[in-house]
Structures are given as C-alpha cells and as structure tokens.
Image: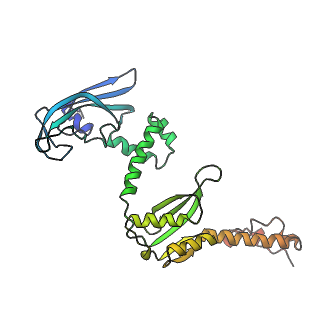
Amino acid sequence: MLVEFNDLENLFHITEPWYVHDCIFNESQKKLDVYLKVYKEALLSCPNCGAGHQPIYDIADYDRTWRHLNFLEYPCYIHAEHPRTDCKKCGKKQRVEIPWAIKPRAGFTKLFDAWIMKLVKDMPMNAVSRLVGEHDTRLWRILHHYVDHALAVQDLSQVTKINTDETSSKRGHNYITIFVDSEKKNVIHVAKGKDAETWRACKEKLEAHGGRVQNVTEVCMDMSAAFIKRASDYFPDASITFDKFHVIQEANRAVDVVRRNERNRCADLKNTRYIWLKNEKNLTKKHKKPSIS
C-alpha cells in the first residue's frame, strides 16, 4: 500500500493545526527529520487560562526538536513551528502546549517516553541507553517524571494488608525496606535502611495518600523483634503474620544446628546438610534408604 504525503500526519501521529511540511532522510547521520508547520488561520487554546478559539500571535520557526519513535531502524526527529496565542480573555501572549510531548522543552515525544518506560521494566537503564542511542541521564529524567507523578497521585485509601521486606540496593550494606499492599500488589513506600523506624515512614506515607492506620488489619514481616515492636506501635489494630520464607529459613537453620551437634555422635549425618533441606518427594532412593540398623 502506498502512503500518500497527506497521510504522513497519521503515520507520525500528528494532529491539526500542525501538518507535515517536509521529511528529509539524512543518509550520513542515518536519521529522519520531520518538519511540521501550523495552519496560520488556526484557533488555539490559551496555555495560561485555557480559553479556546484564540488567534495565533506569532510563530517561532522550527525552534523545538523532539526525538520520536524510530522510523524503521532509523532515529526520527520532529522539528515544529511553535505558535504563540494572543489571548483576548487574560491578555497573555504565550507559546501553546505541544500535544505530542509532555513539556515543550522535554526533547522527547510522548510515544518515545512510552517506549522507554516499556523497556526499563525489563532492562537496566544503561542497556536501554545503548539501544536507543541516548545518554542515560536524559532517559532517567523520563523515568523520574512518570514515577514521581504516579507517586504524587497514589491512592492508598483501600490498603488493609501490608507486606514488608528489606533488600540490598547496591553492593555492600546499603539497604532499603519495601512496603507493599499485598492485595493490590502495589508498592506503598520504599524507605532507606532496614531499621525499625522505617515503619514510621510507611505510616506517614499511608496517611499522606488517604490511608488510615485503623484500616490496616494485617502486616506480614520477618521475625525481627524491633520490627514487631514498631509495627505494633504504628499499626496497633493489625495482626502480625511472619513471612513464610523467613519461617522456613529459621526452621532450616535450626535443623542444621541440630545436625551439626549430633554429627559427632552419628557418622551417618556427615555430608547430609542439603538432604535435610529437600522436600521428601524430591529425595532419591539412596537418600530415603535407612542406613542405621
């Protein structure tokens, strides 16, 4: 199917009053430049007060550039005229909002942002940077923009159960503690460190986003005495459930302590550490066969 020049707006997701004026493929730089113009008679909304049907006051000629989704395997850049309205309601003369980008100076289109957000779910940012050919500092700004917005509008009013665990954020002993809504599988809060005071930070975050301490009926955590105390202090109406993985870990540790203590009296226990950690159904015939008469 042939693509008519008039269909390029649909191809690049461009809406009126902008239209594609020219497309130039730069063979040496291996990129596609798309140039947009504005219909001069168009009436636009004032970016200051929102009043519609305002005439164009002037136009900045191709003073903005945005990285768009790749066209085939080539990077695509949109260059557009940027009109300014002369609002009859508020009297302001300002550049209009660009429909294909979050901010006029962001440097990326919304579709490029969406592509990056999709990639970073499964890839580290430095790998995404190499793939798309953009500096990772610019890509981190995209991620922070959407994550910060999502956190700002987060609704925690329905949270009744909280799971928590700590993990290492970097090599060494830099820990973070993560609190999760176990029913909706959403992260409630991420706190630096792994001390008991992270529960206070969780409570403050919950209440700042519509949650109520009284609504929390259950918390799940490891068996740290300090964690238990702080959870009881800040969520007094919640029952405490110990994380099954920590329970299993403690049980396995206890079994191994007993095995080590009895190994000196029973030679058959030597080299059996990992046998005791297996489920019974996974034991081989050799492991199941009793060796003590």
- Identified at 38% across, 32% down, the residue is 75
Considering only vertical position in the picture, is 191 above or below 16? Answer: below
Query: Which residue in the rendered view is the most extreme toward the top?
Result: 28
Q: In which quarter of the image is residue 12?
A: top left
In front of the other: 78 or 92: 92
Confirm whether residue 216 shows in the render: yes
Q: Could you tell me which quadrant the C terminus lies in?
A: bottom right
Where residue 208 sits: x, y (%)?
40, 64
Q: Count every numbered label the image shows and give the total.
A: 0
Percent across and percent down for residue 178 are: 52, 61
Query: Which image quadrant is residue 67 in?
Result: top left
**Viewer-side residue, 88 vs 96:** 88
| Residue at the image point whose x is 69% and y is 72% from the top | 251
In the rendered view, how is the structure colored?
rainbow
**Residue 228: x and y, percent?**
59, 73
Left or right relative to 134: residue 93: left
Q: Where is residue 205 in the image (x, y as percent from the top left)?
A: 44, 63
Identify the residue at the far front of this view. 91
**Where, by quadrant of the figure, is residue 30 drawn?**
top left
Q: In this view, does 274 lie above or below 108?
A: below
Residue situated in front as seen by the camera: 190 or 71? 190
* Left or right side of 80 for 252: right
- Judge left or right: residue 74 versus residue 5: right
Residue drawn at x 30%, y 41% as measured from the top left: 101
Q: For the N terminus, give its image quadrant.
A: top left
Nearest the eye: 236 or 9: 236
